[in-house]
């Protein structure tokens, strides 16, 4: 974690938009665990909101709405449209021989487990250094961090370290930080610094919430955090993005 | 070749319950050449932001949270131009802005239930989400964005705002030193990081950081008076 204890200044610049990407990722990672930072951010959002209000709007092209509406098909609520889609789907063949009750149960199960919104199958996250210690001037030149790939179809997670210095007597531990403010970070295990490692992806996290989540790496005692939550400083953080195709340059 | 334009407040969507300012149909404060702070090369239709009160918008968000598609479409119709304006100024590129906007509304559809009318004004809440997504999208990707894509934000005119909150912020901004005020506005409107502002103004990054932190602290101070 950075030594910048000026929470107020950090929150203000976060809302203003003037932090660089690593500092921004750090604030995103830190605010989930830091109620003071969270409330400072909310206060700054309210303070500066009139500035946004004063700028003229710009009409977006029509295809944006069409794309949005395509993505928001189906639940939250059950609509007749969704039923039509299910009936046309492959599962109906399975349900054909079953009793009406079984079909209902199956339908509910599918509704619960099969995401109606197309979820990207692959995610990637580039975890950048978040700490600004005395060595910041030299560190900035060396690409330090991790790349993490999630393949939801294969249920695997690949962690690739690049140029990470060995953490002496401590280990680096990877965390998934849900976007929901109250939810605790989920441990994805201690990571190897020597080589890329593939491990099973714990399928308990809802895939549709992955784009909202942040990945962070903390420095922990050997073997990982004894408490199940991060105890050491956050060294790297990054957001998950869809691996390909991705519209940004 | 910095385009200068007057900042005018013409589409207060909603600020306070029961306060719906008149829509200035003959709006002429932003010259089309200057593009209202829109990056050069971006074609745009001037905002057709519909007037809707905070109360109505709160209701629309509540119904969206229940999964009513009609309410969600109304939410989009009344706020998309506002949010697109915010996003495109920050990301600077039309196709990226469209992808971000799409992402913002899919997020709103799934998370409309998080909106708490006791904590936020609806548009401010949505604008904060849009700003966050736009800033995330450009984080670390500044190479394709150039300074002349960002017309000068010259005046945030005091006393013209239709609402008290805004007038106060204008007055407070006017009390800042011009150079600091400019840096602050450029950071907010275009999401410019300190190093970009430093490069543009030919000052050290550390100086820009001091400017921003000082002016933000002053703003907070003035606003609390």
Image (spheres, coloured by chain):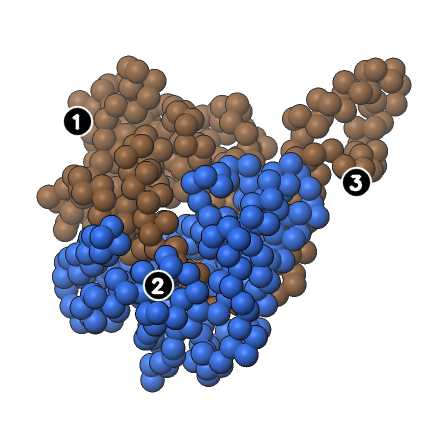
Chain colours: A brown, B blue
Q: Position of residue A32 (x, y in %)?
A: 35, 33
Instruction: Give the camera-side residue of B69 and A135.
Output: B69
Q: Are marks 1 and 2 on the same chain?
A: no
Residue at position x 64%, y 48% in the image:
B72
**SS for dot 3:** helix
| Left or right: where A227 falls relative to A113 | left
Instruction: For mark 3, name the chain.
Output: A
Tell me how far mark 1 sits from mark 2, CA to CA.
56 Å
The reply to whether discs 1 and 2 touch (Cβ–Cβ < 8 Å) is no
Residue under pointer 1: A168
Tell me how far mark 3 sits from mark 1, CA to CA.
58 Å
Residue at position x 17%, y 39% in the image:
A5
Q: Position of residue B94 (x, y in %)?
A: 51, 66
Label 2: how many residues lie within 10 Å, few (<14), some (14-19) or many (20+)?
some
The reply to whether discs 2 and 3 touch (Cβ–Cβ < 8 Å) is no
Q: How many marks?
A: 3
Q: Quadrant of residue A146?
A: top left
Residue at position x 59%, y 62% in the image:
B50
Labels 3, 1: front one: 3
Residue under pointer 2: B167
Residue under pointer 3: A81
Answer whether residue B167 is visible to the viewer in this image: yes
């Amino acid at each position: 974690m950075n030594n910048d204890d000026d929470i107020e200044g950090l929150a203000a610049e976060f809302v203003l938009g003037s932090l660089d990407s690593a500092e921004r990722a750090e604030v995103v990672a830190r605010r989930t665990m830091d109620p003071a930072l969270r409330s400072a951010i909310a206060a700054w959002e309210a303070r500066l909101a009139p500035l946004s209000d004063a700028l003229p709007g710009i009409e977006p092209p029509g295809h944006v709405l069409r794309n949005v509406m395509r993505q928001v098909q189906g639940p939250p609520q059950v609509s007749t449209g969704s039923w039509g889609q299910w009936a046309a789907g492959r599962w109906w063949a399975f349900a054909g021989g079953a009793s009406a009750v079984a079909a209902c149960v199956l339908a509910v199960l599918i509704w619960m487990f099969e995401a109606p919104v197309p979820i990207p199958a692959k995610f990637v996250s580039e975890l950048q250094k978040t700490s600004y210690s005395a060595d910041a001037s030299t560190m900035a030149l060396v690409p330090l961090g991790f790349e993490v790939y999630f393949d939801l179809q294969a249920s695997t997670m690949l962690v690739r370290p690049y140029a990470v210095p060995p953490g002496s007597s401590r280990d680096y531990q990877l965390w998934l930080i849900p976007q929901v403010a109250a939810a605790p970070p989920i441990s994805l295990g201690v990571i190897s610094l020597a080589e890329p490692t593939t491990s099973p992806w714990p399928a308990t996290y809802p895939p549709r919430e992955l784009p909202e989540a942040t990945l962070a790496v903390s420095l922990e005692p050997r073997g990982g955090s004894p408490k199940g939550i991060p105890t050491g400083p956050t060294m790297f953080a990054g957001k998950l993005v869809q691996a390909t195709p991705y519209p940004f340059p | 070749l910095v385009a200068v334009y007057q900042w005018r407040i013409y589409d207060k969507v909603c600020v306070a319950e029961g306060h719906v300012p008149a829509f200035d149909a003959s709006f002429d404060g932003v010259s089309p050449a200057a593009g209202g702070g829109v990056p050069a090369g971006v074609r745009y239709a001037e905002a057709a932001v519909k007037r809707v009160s905070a109360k109505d918008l709160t209701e629309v968000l509540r119904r969206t949270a229940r999964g009513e598609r009609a309410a969600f479409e109304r939410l989009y119709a009344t706020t998309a131009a506002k949010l697109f304006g915010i996003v495109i100024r920050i990301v600077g590129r039309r196709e990226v802005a469209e992808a971000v906007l799409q992402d913002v509304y899919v997020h709103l559809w799934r998370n409309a239930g998080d909106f708490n009318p006791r904590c936020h004004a609806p548009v401010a809440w949505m604008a904060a989400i849009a700003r966050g997504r736009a800033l995330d999208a450009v984080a670390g990707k500044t190479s394709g964005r150039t300074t002349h894509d960002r017309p000068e934000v010259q005046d945030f005119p005091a006393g013209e705002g239709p609402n008290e909150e805004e007038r106060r912020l204008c007055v407070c901004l006017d009390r800042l030193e011009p150079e600091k005020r400019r840096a602050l506005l450029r950071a907010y409107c275009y999401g410019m990081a300190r190093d970009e502002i430093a490069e543009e103004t030919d000052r050290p990054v550390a100086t820009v950081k001091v400017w921003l932190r000082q002016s933000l602290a002053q703003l907070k101070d003035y606003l609390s008076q």
